[in-house]
Image (spheres, grey):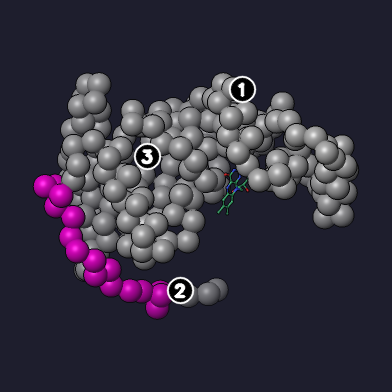
């Protein structure tokens, strides 16, 4: 058995006070995201998305946040035939988690996911680099794949099919938006006495902010 108990470090970042927090969790999140980018966090927009299947099996994976609206919806894009999509179709309750190690910060967002319209997805799809557009066609995401060669072959055949043409959006590809119901901001502190604040919605745009034990 591998013992990882010696992997231990003190978290020595400035504390987080309630008075530091913006009234709006969306604004607070945007401040932290900008700081994460500025400090050089790798893939600062990467978030762990947890979903639950109809039979209660939990599953988590990383996706990229592509858009956040002032009202607190967070968008990501994926394959609608994937495991995550199957989970969301059966149970739209999801949890998102950002972990920014350089700033010792974590944000957890719980909410309800729903599909974006085809027009919205298409708008983003058209902005993607051509190789990513072709890649979207080539992947039957989450299905069994016999070999890497097969995947590369799918890619090359798709590239040929669209040669000299615009790559259309696959019908099995698109975005989701997660309407946030609660936001939790966590700042690592020394002695494991971390600062945690939970935002819950009291009324439209009115959020209650409470401190939690670490
Ligand atoms: C940094 C990073 C970013 C990723 N971004 C996405 C993404 O935006 N959309 C996506 O479908 N998969 C993304 N993936 C791959 C997913 O983590 C996952 O492997 C894939 O979506 C299949 O998940 P599923 O089988 O649970 O549906 C990313 C992985 C990493 C590590």
Disc 3 target residue: 109
The answer to whether residue 40 is seen in the rendering is yes
Residue 200 % position (x, y): 25, 32
Residue segment shown in magenta: 5-20
* Marks 3 and 1 in Cβ contact (< 8 Å): no
> Image quadrant of residue 57?
top right
Q: CA distance from mark 3 to mark 2?
A: 29 Å
Q: Quadrant of residue 105?
A: bottom left
For disc 2, the marked residue is: 4
Quick check: 130 left or right of 149?
left
Quadrant including the N terminus:
bottom right
Q: Alpha carbon of mark 3 to alpha carbon of mark 1: how far?
A: 25 Å
> Mark 3 packing: few (<14 Cα in 10 Å), some, or many (20+)?
many
Q: Nearer the viewer, residue 44 or 164?
A: 164
Where, by quadrant of the figure, is residue 130 drawn?
Answer: top right
Q: CA distance from mark 2 to mark 1?
A: 47 Å
Residue located at (46% from left, 49% from top): 45
Is label 3 or label 2 in front?
A: 3
Q: Which residue is mark 1?
A: 118
Residue 42 numbered tag: none
Relative to 204, is 158 on the left or the right?
A: right
Q: In the depicted view, which residue is nearer to us: 183 or 167?
A: 167
Q: Earlier in the sequence, mark 3 or mark 2?
A: 2
Relative horizontal placement of residue 206, taking residue 31 as reference (left or right)? left
- Label 1 sits on a secondary structure element that is helix
Residue 32 in picture, x, y percent from top left: 31, 51
Rendered location of residue 10, percent (x, y): 28, 72
Quadrant, the C terminus: bottom left
């Amino acid at each position: 058995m591998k013992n990882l108990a010696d992997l231990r470090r003190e978290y020595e970042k400035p504390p987080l006070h309630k008075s530091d927090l913006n009234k709006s969790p969306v604004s607070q999140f945007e401040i932290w995201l900008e700081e994460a980018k500025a400090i050089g966090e790798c893939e600062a927009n990467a978030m762990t998305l947890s979903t639950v299947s109809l039979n209660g099996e939990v599953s988590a994976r990383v996706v990229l946040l592509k858009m956040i609206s002032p009202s607190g919806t967070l968008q990501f894009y994926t394959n609608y035939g994937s495991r995550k999509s199957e989970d969301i179709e059966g149970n739209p309750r999801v949890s998102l988690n950002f972990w920014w190690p350089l700033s010792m910060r974590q944000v957890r967002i719980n909410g309800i996911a729903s599909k974006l319209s085809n027009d919205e997805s298409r708008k983003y799809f058209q902005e993607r680099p051509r190789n990513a557009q072709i890649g979207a066609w080539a992947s039957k995401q989450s299905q069994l794949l016999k070999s890497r060669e097969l995947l590369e072959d799918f890619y090359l055949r798709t590239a040929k099919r669209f040669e000299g043409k615009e790559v259309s959006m696959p019908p099995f590809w698109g975005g989701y938006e997660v309407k946030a119901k609660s936001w939790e901001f966590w700042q690592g502190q020394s002695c494991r006495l971390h600062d945690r604040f939970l935002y819950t919605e009291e009324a439209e745009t009115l959020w209650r902010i409470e401190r939690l034990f670490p």
